[in-house]
Amino acid sequence: MDLTPYLEGLRADLAALAAPGGPDVARAAEVLGASLEPSARMVLLEALSDAAAEITTRLNGPTVEVRLRGREADLVVGRAVPEPASSGPPSVPAYTDGELSRLTLRMPESLKAHVEQIAAAEGISVNAWLVRAVTSAAHEQRPGNGRRVTGFYQA
């Protein structure tokens, strides 16, 4: 999906709103429109990402994700990858109350690249992988589950 027509429409609207103010205001609007383009592009990508996440939660199986290719956003529909059967720990409960929240996560670039590789190998989005990892970690930390991690680390 090419976001450029939407951004050009925003610039045109800004120019039309500034036109009655005269040439100085019109020029200021033109400069402002050019300066706002990267931010507006990011906001559009976030809106697409939020929409894809919400659609995924409602599909009960298939996944929808946004992939950025250059300056274009592609919406990709995929199949959920079934969990392999294992004799390991019991399954982790799903938190499916339907409400989604945004969380900013900062991590080292090398860890981010590793997470992206793992998620791609599993055929799921990074967001879906992170949700699964956090859900699993939250399940491990429930009071009364009898599991405790202790130790010492020195760098």
Image (cartoon, rainbow, N blue to C red):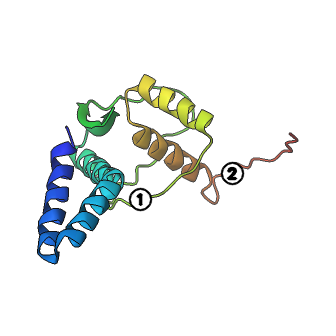
The residue beneath circle 2 is 146
Crowd band around label 1 with a 10 angstrom C-alpha radius: few (<14), some (14–19), many (20+) = few
From the top left corner, tell me how far across and down residue 44 is, in percent.
27, 52
Query: Judging from the image, what secondary structure is the residue with disc 2 in?
Result: loop
Q: Residue at x 60, y 45 (%)?
A: 107
User: Residue 154 sits in which quadrant?
Assistant: top right
Q: Nearer the viewer, residue 139 or 108?
A: 108
Q: Earlier in the sequence, mark 1 or mark 2?
A: 1
Q: Is disc 1 in contact with disc 2, using a CB cutoff of under 8 Å?
A: no
In this view, which residue lies farthest toward the bottom?
A: 21
> Disc 1 marks which amino acid?
Arg
State how far apart marks 1 and 2 are (Cα).
31 Å
The answer to whether 134 is drawn above or below residue 102 in the figure is above
Rendered residue at 48%/32% (across/down):
116
Decide which of 22, 10 is in the foreground and name it: 22
Residue designated by label 1? 102
Quadrant position of the C terminus in the picture: top right
State the image coordinates of residue 49 (x, y, percent, origin top left).
31, 48
Quarter of the view holding residue 69: top left
